Image (tube, grey):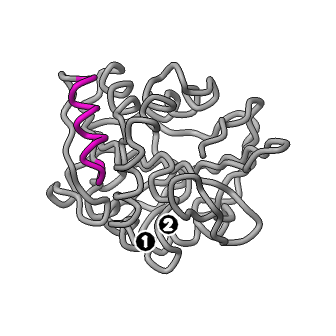
Amino acid sequence: MMNKVSGAYSSRAAEYSDLFGSMGAVHPSDRQLVSAWAAGIEGRVIDAGCGPGQWTNFLAQQGHDARGVDLVPEFIERARHTYPDVPFEVGSLDTLDVDTGTVGAILSWYSLIHHEPTKIRVPLQEFNRALRPGGVLLIGFFEGPAIEEFAHTVAPAYRWPVHHLSEKLISAGFDIIEAHTRPTTGRRPHAAIIARRTHGTPPDNHPPHLTPRSGCTSGGSRSAQSCKLRDPLPLID
């Protein structure tokens, strides 16, 4: 499945990069959420499924030791050309080329939407393996009332209810810190989850550097906090 997805993106890499491959194409609320998340992270950061590399470079500009990984060679070639001072590599999110417990944070911004629901546990467990105790993960995805496939412009993709993806994360060894849902009229609803690697760490409610966003309602240390932000996420087709 992922080889087909990689091939589909390879054939449209230039088009996709022109449309979405710069921070100028990013909605302000996206930047707000990722910036707030990144402000408290420590250690190495992996942009897992980095695409043309704009988010990896953004994190590097914030002073983080950031590295981009993507399965599509054309994206990595473009990223290296556009951001020569930032490291990028071709690789699978299912098998990250890092030692166990050495990564401080992982950004997975819409990079798991093409994973089949029965197989999404594989990259989630890999993220858990790579992160050090207390390491944090930010996932962006399309939200829906049920786990269902839809016709994404590039390749088949999946919508996830927040609570279902949260359950998958908890099962993979994460504690849910925040969940954001952003319904938009006439567009696919978007969502994001911030989670923390819990194995080997005390079961406290929140790490000291991450606290609930304004407007969030806590449901406990292992349940999602529901947050609705003022601005919607952009449509990503």
Q: What's the residue at 24%, 47% (across, down)?
A: 73
Q: Is residue 102 visible?
A: yes
Given residues 20 and 56, the one toward you in this image is: 20
The residue tagged 1 is 172
Q: What's the residue at 27%, 60% (across, down)?
A: 92
**Marks 1 and 2: in contact by CB < 8 Å?**
yes
Dot 1 amino acid type: Ala
Residue farthest front in this picture: 11
| Residue 172 picture quarter | bottom left
| Quadrant containing the N terminus in the rendered view | bottom left
Secondary structure under tag 2 reads helix
The residue tagged 2 is 169
Given residues 136 and 126, the one toward you in this image is: 126
| Residue 149 picture quarter | bottom right
Rendered location of residue 31, percent (x, y): 54, 27
Secondary structure under tag 1 reads loop
Q: What's the residue at 50%, 39% (across, down)?
A: 210
Figure check: 205 above or below 67: below
Q: Which residues are magenta?
A: 70-83
Q: What's the residue at 52%, 29% (across, down)?
A: 36
Rendered location of residue 58, percent (x, y): 38, 24
Examine the structure image and report whether residue 76 is included in the region drawn in magenta. Answer: yes
User: Pointer 1: residues within 10 angstroms few (<14), some, or many (20+)?
Assistant: many
Rendered location of residue 6, percent (x, y): 35, 58
Marker disc for residue 216: none
Dot 2 amino acid type: Leu
Examine the structure image and report whether residue 112 is included in the region drawn in magenta. Answer: no
Q: Is residue 44 visible?
A: no
Rendered location of residue 224, percent (x, y): 65, 58
User: Pointer 2: residues within 10 angstroms few (<14), some, or many (20+)?
Assistant: many
